[in-house]
Image (cartoon, rainbow, N blue to C red):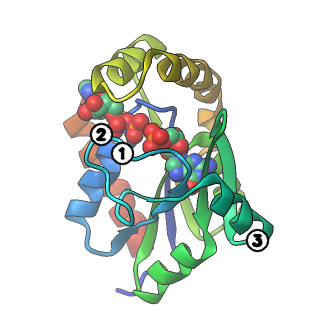
C-alpha cells in the first residue's frame, strides 16, 4: 500500500529506547523508511554518514538554515545542532513509504503540529528517571559531561508525554517492540 504523506514520530528523552524500537520496526515493516537527520555532532561507534545521520559541519548547517532547508532544527545540546531536511521527507514519500523519525521531544511536537492529521506521534516512556540514567550510562557512548547534560534535559522532557498521541511504556523491551509494531501497523492501515 502506498504510504506517501504519512509520518510516524518516536520521541523521548535520550536513553528511553527509541532508537532500539525504531530499528526493530524498520527491520519488520518494509513500508517504513528512516528519516536521516543532519547533525553537527561527530559519528559515534560504527555510525555511518548517510545511514544514521548526515554528519555535516556547523558552517554547512548554518548555511542550510539560512536557505530554509530544514522542516525543523534545534540546538539539542549546547553547540550541537540536529535537524530534519525537507528533501529527506520528500525523498521517502517519493518511494511510497511512510517516514519514521527518531527525534527529541521538542522536535517531535514541532513535526506533530506541522503535519497535523498525517502524523502518529509516540512518546517512549522509561520506567523512571533512575532507570533512564542507568540505560544511558550503560550504553557507554557519552562522556561524563555529555551524560550530565542529557540527564538534565531528560528530566524536563518527561513532562511532555501527555502532549503526544500515544505514550508507549518501554519497561520490557520485547513487549514495547510488539506494542509499537501493532500501533504502527494500525496507523498504516488507516
Ligand atoms: P534512545 O534512542 O532513546 O537514546 P537507545 O535505544 O539508544 O535510546 O537505548 C538506550 C540504551 O538502553 C541502549 O543501550 C539500549 O540497548 C537499552 N535499552 C533500550 N530499551 C531497554 C529496555 N526495555 N530494557 C533495558 N535496556 C533497554
Ligand atoms: P544522539 O546524539 O543521541 O543521536 O541524539 C540526541 C538527540 O537528538 C536524540 O533525542 C535524538 O532523537 C535527537 N534528534 C535526532 N535527530 C533530530 C532532528 O532531526 N531534530 C531534532 N529536533 N532532534 C533530533
> What is the x, y in percent for residue 176?
29, 39
Is the residue marked 2 within 8 Å of ligand 1, measured from its CB? yes
**Which residue is rendered at x = 67% and y = 55% of the image?**
73
**Which residue is rendered at x = 34% and y = 63% of the image?**
51
Q: CA distance from mark 3 to mark 2?
A: 36 Å
Q: Residue furthest right?
A: 66
In this figure, which residue is indicated by the disc labeled 3? 68
Q: Quick one: 101 or 55, which is closer to the camera? A: 55
In this figure, which residue is indicated by the disc labeled 2? 176
Q: What is the crowding at mark 1: few (fewer than 14 residues within 10 Å), some, or many (at least 20)?
A: some
Quadrant assignment, res 182: bottom left
In this figure, which residue is indicated by the disc labeled 1? 19
Looking at the image, is mark 1 or mark 3 nearer the viewer? 3
Q: Earlier in the sequence, mark 2 or mark 1?
A: 1
Task: Report helix, strand or loop for mark 1.
Answer: helix
Task: Report helix, strand or loop for mark 3.
Answer: loop
Q: Quadrant of ligand 1?
A: top left
Residue 99 shows up from this direction? yes
Q: Quadrant of the N terminus?
A: bottom left
Taking 172 as reference, is 66 left or right?
Answer: right
> What is the x, y in percent for residue 2?
40, 87
Looking at the image, is mark 2 or mark 1 nearer the viewer? 1
Q: What is the crowding at mark 2: few (fewer than 14 residues within 10 Å), some, or many (at least 20)?
A: some
Residue 4 shows up from this direction? no
Is the residue marked 1 within 8 Å of ligand 1, measured from its CB? yes
**Which residue is rendered at x = 76% and y = 71% of the image?**
68
Task: Report helix, strand or loop for mark 2.
Answer: helix
Q: Do the residues bearing badges 1 and 3 touch, measured as CB atoms within 8 Å?
A: no
Quadrant assignment, res 67: bottom right
Amino acid at each position: 500500500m502506498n504510504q506517501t504523506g504519512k509520518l510516524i514520530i518516536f520521541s523521548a528523552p535520550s536513553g528511553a529506547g527509541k532508537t532500539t524500537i525504531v530499528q526493530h520496526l524498520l527491520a519488520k515493516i518494509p513500508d517504513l523508511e528512516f528519516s536521516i537527520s543532519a547533525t553537527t555532532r561527530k559519528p559515534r561507534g560504527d555510525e555511518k554518514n548517510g545511514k544514521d545521520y548526515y554528519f555535516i559541519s556547523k558552517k554547512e548547517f548554518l548555511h542550510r538554515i539560512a536557505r530554509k532547508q530544514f522542516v525543523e532544527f534545534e540546538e539539542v545540546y549546547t553547540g550541537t545542532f540536529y535537524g530534519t531536511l525537507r528533501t529527506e521527507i520528500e525523498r521517502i514519500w517519493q518511494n511510497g513509504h511512510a517516514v519514521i523519525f527518531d527525534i527529541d521531544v521538542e522536535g517531535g511536537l514541532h513535526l506533530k503540529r506541522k503535519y497535523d492529521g498525517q502524523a502518529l506521534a509516540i512518546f517512549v516512556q522509561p520506567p523512571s528517571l533512575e532507570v533512564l540514567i542507568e540505560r544511558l550510562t550503560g550504553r557507554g557512548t557519552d562522556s561524563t559531561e555529555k551524560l550530565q547534560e542529557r540527564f538534565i534535559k531528560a528530566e524536563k522532557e518527561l513532562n511532555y508525554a501527555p502532549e503526544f498521541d500515544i505514550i508507549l511504556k518501554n519497561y520490557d523491551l520485547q513487549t514495547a517492540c510488539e506494542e509499537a509494531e501493532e500501533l504502527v501497523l494500525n496507523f498504516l492501515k488507516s
